[in-house]
Amino acid sequence: MPYEPTLTLATPEDYRFSANLGYLMRSPKECLHLIRDGRLYKALPLDGTPVLEIGADDDNRLLVAFADDRGVPSEDVRAASLAYIREWLDLDTDLEPFYRLAADDPILAAAASMHKGLRLIGIPDLFEAMAWGILGQQINLAFAYTLKARLVEAYGTPVSCAGDTCWTFPQPEVIAGLEVKDLLPLKLTVKKCEYLIHAAELIAGGALSKGRLQELGYREAEKALVRIRGIGPWTANYVLMRCLRMKDAFPIDDVGLHHALRHVTGSDAKPSREEILRLSAGWRGWESYATFYLWRLLY
DNA sequence: TACCAGGATATGG
DNA sequence: CCATATCATGGT
């Protein structure tokens, strides 16, 4: 079904829209975007919450339409939407160095080849990234999606989208105003309720911001995050990877990474920290991308 | 049905 | 500093 794209967006030579949709479709419980007939829909967390419909043409360009019935938005909103897409889908990173190192890497070669054209899908909003990390601690991914959907449907904002509902993630100001007892019915642990509310308070109060973390650089930003209650090394690196887009962020404690490494090496035991450091020695500066690609081997 | 899941923290040695 | 218990529901 043809549609009239309002905007077109050039992508890098090695970009493949379908490879990225593959990642975005990994959970049927995802509530922050939806995919229909090869097109991606999302309500952007920007002023006016524009709803985007994103497809691709044969020349590997992204075709962007505004999928709500409010007509074409203002120039400002269009520009902000394009900027959001570039960041979310990571259209401005040159992946050539990553593919070059992956081609000769016994761990990465297969994943890089199989999913070539995939980019690290981001979580531009800091609170969403932290909340998603906290929710996902020590539970399987399917359950994490269930919890996220409950949180979003309780405290987020519904937006009509392609005859369905897209949601925007709850604002930190909203979650900061809650008490543990408000979140318990979602079946989070008491600690996760506390972590979530505390993170929301830090961001809503201005004590923590994406911009400030960005200025710190990887090591210092990691330290700053780990000092926050409920944010350990895994969550800190997850946030730096998905939100701050630090390419050397590396969630080395990630169970999914461990499974992927076992899958590639054929080992039946969880790799030790030393083993992972040895296997990843050649990934310097691309640890986040390496992890993201390895995750794709799991589902 | 058991087992375990994209961990973090508190506690005890 | 390292090992262990605890959280706690739900997916497979």
Image (spheres, coloured by chain):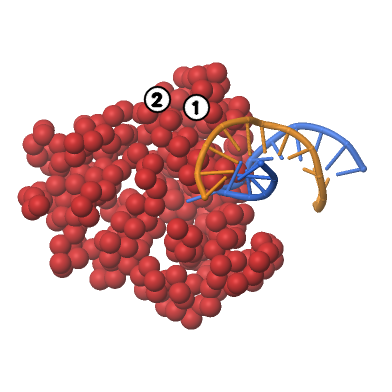
Chain colours: A red, B blue, C orange
A92 or A254, nearer to the observer? A254
**Residue in the picture at 12% in, 38% down:** A73
**Residue in the picture at 47% in, 53% down:** A241
Residue linked to disc 1: A186
Asked whether the beta carbons under mark 2 and mark 1 sit within 8 Å of each other, the answer is: yes
Q: Is residue B9 above or below residue A52?
A: above
Q: State which chain disc 2 sits on.
A: A
Q: Name the image quarter holding the C terminus of chain A.
A: bottom left
In the rendered image, residue A225, in percent from the top left (x then y), is placed at 56, 43
Q: Is residue A159 above or below residue A284?
A: above
Which dot marks residue A215?
Answer: none
**Residue in the picture at 66% in, 66% down:** A268
Residue A279 sits in quarter? bottom right
**Residue in the picture at 19% in, 39% down:** A162
Q: Is residue A99 above or below residue A288?
A: below
Is A254 left, or right, of A103 in this rendering? right
Mark 2 or mark 1: whose residue is earlier in sequence? 2
Q: Which kind of residue does numbered mark 1 sit on?
A: Leu
CA gap between label 2 and label 1 equals 9 Å
Which dot marks residue A154?
Answer: 2
A21 or A299, nearer to the observer? A299
Q: State which chain disc 1 sits on.
A: A
In the rendered image, residue A28, in percent from the top left (x then y), is placed at 37, 45
Density class for disc 1 (Cα within 10 Å; few <14, some 14-19, many ≥20) is some
